[in-house]
Image (cartoon, grey):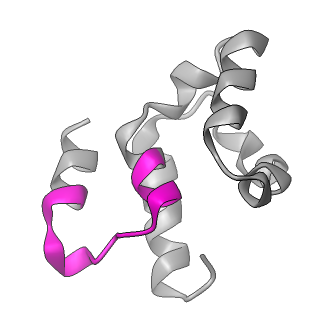
Amino acid sequence: MQLANKILSNSSTRITHPIVREILKENISYWFDDDRKQKRWKEKVPEWYCRQYSKWERYLREPIETVINEVIEELTNGKA
């Protein structure tokens, strides 16, 4: 999680969105290990994020760095 900590502590990245910060702080693969944890993850985030859940499905078994890179790319393109 060094990459996540580095990104969160770097003020130049300006990542202040609470969901983005939550994604960076949590190892997403942990939450998707089973249905119970998946449900807990969905309960932690707002409804609009849950509606976008399918978009993140491809990351279920990928490292958190993959998710972080995708989030950063979307932020820099103004999509997130």
Relative depth, front residue between 66 and 55 = 55
Q: Is residue 16 magenta?
A: yes
Residue 56 x, y percent position in the rendering? 71, 48
Relative horizontal placement of residue 11, taking residue 65 as reference (left or right)? left
Relative horizontal placement of residue 79, taking residue 15 as reference (left or right)? right
Q: Main secondary structure of the magenta part?
A: helix
**Does residue 10 sit above or below 60 in this rendering?**
below
Relative horizontal placement of residue 36, taking residue 73 as reference (left or right)? right
Residue 27 x, y percent position in the rendering? 44, 31
Quadrant position of residue 78: bottom right
**Does residue 36 sit above or below 12 in this rendering?**
above
Residue at horizontal 23%, vertical 59%?
7
Relative horizontal placement of residue 42, taking residue 17 as reference (left or right)? right
Relative depth, front residue between 40 and 62 = 40
Specify the farthest residue to the bottom: 78
Residue at horizontal 76%, vertical 41%?
57
Residue 64 x, y percent position in the rendering? 44, 39
Residue at horizontal 26%, vertical 76%?
13
